[in-house]
């Protein structure tokens, strides 16, 4: 049901079609949970991953914010660095 909210297209095994579907479905992503579902479905078919970091501009604070999406355990210091736009790692 969550995927249907993002895109009406089924997942494809054809790489070219998967790229098109990933791009089309990305346009509908507006919320953090939608981005997570998109990375686990459409993007995950193209680029299998266990860690994704998403950067977005926050108009209120006028700075770049990072969200970390992971399915593997990471050290707390690494999680902090990945989520901090001012950390040496993210700069």
Image: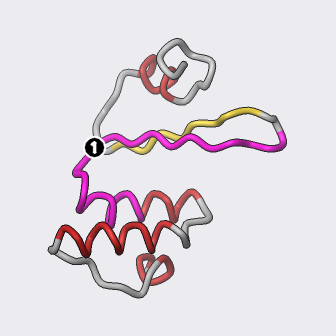
Give residue 41's position: percent from left, percent from top: 32, 66
**Residue 70 or 76: which is nearer the viewer?**
70
* Residue name at image x 69 percent, y 42 percent: 57
* Residue name at image x 34 percent, y 28 percent: 74
Which residues are drawn in magenta? 38-60
Give residue 67's position: percent from left, percent from top: 54, 41
Q: Name the residue under label 1.
A: 50
The quadrant of the rendering that contains the C terminus is: top right
Give residue 25's position: percent from left, percent from top: 45, 73
Q: Quadrant of residue 46?
A: bottom left
Would you place residue 13 above or below residue 86 in this image?
below
**Residue 1 or 15: which is nearer the viewer?**
15
Would you place residue 70 above or below residue 46 in this image?
above
Q: Would residue 49 be counted in the magenta stretch?
A: yes
Q: Residue furthest right?
A: 60
Q: Would residue 64 be found to the left or right of residue 1 on screen? A: right
Give residue 71's position: percent from left, percent from top: 31, 45
Q: In which quarter of the image is residue 87?
A: top right
* Residue name at image x 25 percent, y 52 percent: 47
Q: Would residue 69 be found to the left or right of residue 13 on screen? A: right
């Amino acid at each position: 049901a969550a995927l249907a909210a993002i895109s009406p297209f089924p997942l494809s095994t054809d790489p070219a079609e998967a790229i098109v579907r990933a791009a089309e479905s990305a346009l509908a992503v507006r919320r953090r949970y939608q981005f997570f579902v998109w990375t686990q479905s459409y993007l995950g078919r193209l680029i299998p991953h266990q860690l994704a970091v998403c950067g977005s501009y926050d108009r209120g604070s006028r700075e770049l914010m990072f969200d970390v999406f992971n399915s593997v355990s990471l050290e707390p210091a690494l999680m902090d660095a990945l989520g901090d736009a001012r950390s040496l790692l993210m700069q």
